[in-house]
Amino acid sequence: MRLMQDTPLYRLYEHIHLSRLAQLPRLVRTLEASGTKELAGSIMRVDINIFILKGWESLYRQDLHRLLSLCPSIKVVDHTPNFETKSQLDPIIYATLAKFLDKITCLSLGRDGVSFEVQWRLISGLTTLRELEFHAGILDDSPDSYAQKFTATLPHLFSLTIVL
């Protein structure tokens, strides 16, 4: 099946919103089974607002890796998972995001209890980032000093929201 950008199926997959953990592996299987890269390539935005039970963090990371590796056209990500308990995989999940989001223009990171240093490792490498919203981990300095750090490192950033 060859998809054209103006078909309803293409537009249906342009913005994906995942609100339950089970939707992520189903989406990955659908994209893999489509037999075409156009379907995965049509995804421009992904909102991940799911609750992750204790013990499911590793599976989530694996499925997130599979999804992002299939979708090279993603420009906007809202990554707001809610973990039942503090996840030890947070740095690994952030490294997974960093690996695949090098062309992203808009990023929203939810409150996940990750340290600012882990968040910064992801954010500082996103040179195409134009808009950033994040729930800061524990801040050692004032929000103004972090804003200065972002604007110095990310010169193309024109919108920064730090939620405390």
Image: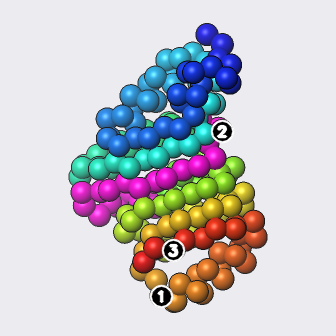
Residue 134: x and y, percent?
A: 50, 67
Task: Tell me the SS state at disc 1.
Answer: loop
The residue shown at (42%, 61%) is 110
Q: Which amino acid type corresponds to the residue marked 3 in the rendered image? A: Ile
Mark toward the start of the polypeptide (3 vs 2):
2
Is residue 60 in view from this perspective?
Answer: yes
Instruction: Quadrant for residue 125, please give it.
Output: bottom right
Point out the stretch of residues depicted in magenta. 70-93
The residue shown at (62%, 30%) is 42
Residue 87: x and y, percent?
A: 32, 60
Circle nearer the viewer, 3 or 2: 3
Residue 83: x and y, percent?
A: 30, 56
Label 3: few (<14), some or many (≥20) within 10 Å? some
The disc at residue 73 is 2
Above/below status of 69 relative to 32: below
Circle nearer the viewer, 3 or 1: 3
